Image: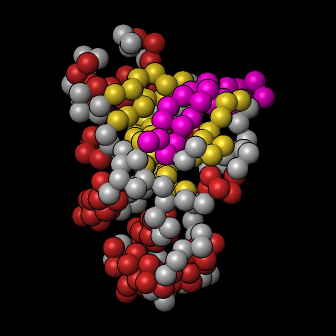
Amino acid sequence: MSVLNVQNLTKVYKDVIAVDGISFSVSKGEIVGLLGPNGAGKTSTISMILGVLEPSGGNVFIDGKDIVKKRSEALVRTNFAAVYAQLPGNLSVYQNLMFFGLLYDVHGIRARIETMLEKFDLKHYKNSKVGFLSSGEQTRVGLAKAMLNSPGLLLLDEPTASLDPSTARTTRESIKEYAAEGKGGVVWTSHNMQEVEAVCDRVLFLSHGKILLEGNPKTLAAQHGKKDLEELFITVAREPLSLDI
């Protein structure tokens, strides 16, 4: 069953087409990579899925609910994390998680917070103000917030960008375990192609607002005559029209 269904989604800024009629779905238990160079339309797509940016055309359904017509129902089990979406710095880690837990009406909120503090190695920072934490620590708090409500749809924009290799690996494993439970799907954007290959079940390459390529990250590069996913990414970024698709 699809937790996310995007149909002919379009976003136009004056005379610039940022997202050009894209369609894709994400199933329960699936991690889908949304890839492409800066300006390809990834962030605009995620913003429209989250309902913070109004589409110029098309539809977004989360668990079968139209994001425009049934916004609250669609978003109640959706969550998001990104390095640029910082949490209130004047609140402690615990206060942030409590605030968002209440916002999402999480049952057994105190026990759930303790579980997230343990999962993301944050117990030591429980009473520390988020604004005084390092970028990596803040990223972990953001991920704890994103998984607090056991979302049916989890959107992650460069989730491990500021983490050290060890913490990044642990974080990837946590998200893979979450997806493997089969209760939700994940949309993952990253410029780290090794990470994408290790984590994602399927990838979509965006270029100039269109989905140019789609497939298994472990085999897609070879299908297009490239030695690895990074070389394919570079080709899509530099010369998308030269690809034999």
Image: 1 above or below 176: above
Image: 235 above or below 200: above
Magenta residue span: 1-25
Residue 178 x %, y % = 34, 59
Label count reads 0
Q: Is residue 52 left or right of residue 166?
A: right
Q: Which residue is drawn at the image coordinates 74% and 45% (left, top)?
A: 69
Nearest the viewer among 22 and 195 is: 22
Magenta span includes 12: yes
Q: Is residue 91 visible?
A: yes
Q: From this viewpoint, which residue is outermost toward the right?
A: 14
Image: 54 above or below 121: above
Q: Is residue 19 visible?
A: no
Q: In this view, does 136 lie to the left or right of 208?
A: left
Image: 227 above or below 126: above
Residue 89 x %, y % = 59, 76
Q: Is residue 100 left or right of residue 234?
A: right
Residue 112 x %, y % = 44, 78
